[in-house]
Image (cartoon, coloured by chain):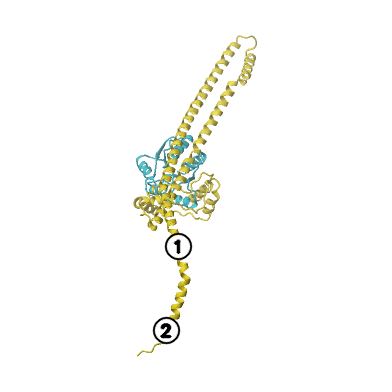
Amino acid sequence: MERVDFQKILYQIEEIRALFIFAQRVIPYLEEVIRFVQETTPLIQEVNNSILDSSSKMPAAVAQLDKVSATTEMATSDILDGIDRILNRIDNALQVVARFEKQEKERIQLEKSLILKLAETLDGEKATREAEVEKALEAFYAESQSQKDLEELRENLLALQTDAYDIMNLMQIQDITTQQIMAANSLIESVQEKLMELISRFGAIEAKPVNKKIRAFDPNATFEDRSDIQALADELLNQGEVTEVSEEETRELAVTVVENAPQDEADKTTEDPSQTGEKASQEEIDSLFQKFKQS
Amino acid sequence: MDQIKFLAVDDSPTMRRIVVNTLKRIGYDDVIEAANGKDALAKLYSEKVDVVITDWNMPEMNGLEFVKAVKSDDNFKDLPILMITTRGVKDDILEAMRAGVSSYIVKPFSPQTLKSKIETILKQS
């Protein structure tokens, strides 16, 4: 008969007792955890619903922003039409001023010759008489307001023309803001995509693919004055960062990009430029090109 | 002034109009337009163009791809291309230069800048 090892039994009983004591201490915590899970489940469900709700509103927000772009484009087109009409009218007015000036000169010439003919009938030496009449006529026409008025009118029309062109030039803001809106829309669609993934992980719904529009934009587009960054390009050029690409290389690049790249890849290229690069001013760019051409 | 034919490429009708009107203002009336690189390539094959002014960010075929495609064609390798874009990051400028653009203008641009760049391009060509 096998000998009973009481020492071992006692040790195991002691272990069981310790386990009971541990369980006694742990149970309240477990109850707490269960209660927490019970309480948070509806909250998670609520968060889920909220995300689902917000996510479902995102396409509407994107559509609204697209509408803003379309509306501003239409309005800009109307403004540019208006500017075209203003410029045409200014052109017409300048032509009228030029015609009027020509007529005035002809009229003055005619008046002068008539007066000189009349002067021939006066008494006195011919040369002296003519000189006196010429002098009197010059003084008379110098005081004439019509020439001054015409000159003032022309200056005002030219100033109006400049103002109209300046307004036209400022309309570049439409293109820039459209690109900014496109960037915002692209961001909203990406967030929507991530939220859909998150919800589907919770098992609330099946992830539906987000209908992303193809957009070509620069997320860094800005209407700020960019004429102060020329120094950077100079620096780049001095460092000799520009290296010419061989004709063959250019050809390869073009073939790869134009013929083989899928449409979405091509769009990604236009949508996602480096966000970390340094901005260059017009002067910097000019200098960069100067050096590039010389090299 | 000899009649110089321009091709203005931009997906934004507003920008095309501004470029065309600015060109007219500085004395260049002969301008044709395209809305993207693909459209512009087709125009280049059908009409004789002296100078191209192109945007970068465009759908279908962007400005950089367009420049590369133009420069890879022996018929157009010497065609001056001026890029007007919002992209003012140095790497972008270098990339455009490597692709073969003759000049680079950052939007928003002034008529004076466009005029001086065109004059420089025409002197060089």
The amino acid pointed to by label 2 is Ile
Residue A10 visible? The answer is yes
Residue B46, x across and y down, in percent: 35, 40
User: What is the display colour for chain A?
Assistant: yellow
Residue A119, x across and y down, in percent: 61, 11
Instruction: Find out whether the residues at labels 2 and 1 contact each other: C-beta distance under 8 Å.
Output: no
Of residue B30 and residue B85, the one placed in the foreground of this image is: B85
User: What is the display colour for chain B?
Assistant: cyan
Residue sitting at the far bottom: A1
Of residue A46 and residue A239, the one placed in the foreground of this image is: A46
- Crowding around mark 2 (Cα neighbors within 10 Å: few <14, some 14 to 19, many 20+) is few
Residue B56, x across and y down, in percent: 43, 46
The image shows residue A156, relative to residue A40, as above or below, that is above
Disc 1 chain ID: A
Q: Quadrant of residue A37?
A: bottom left
- Crowding around mark 1 (Cα neighbors within 10 Å: few <14, some 14 to 19, many 20+) is few
Q: Residue at x 55, y 31 (%)?
A: A159
The image shows residue A40, relative to residue A107, as above or below, that is below
Of residue B60 and residue B73, the one placed in the foreground of this image is: B60
Q: Quadrant of the N terminus of chain A?
A: bottom left
Q: Residue at x 54, y 51 (%)?
A: A232
Q: Quadrant of residue B51?
A: top left
* Residue ID for mark 2: A9
* Residue ID for mark 1: A35
The amino acid pointed to by label 1 is Arg
Alpha carbon separation for disc pair 2 and 1: 38 Å
Element at label 1: helix
Disc 2 chain ID: A
Element at label 2: helix
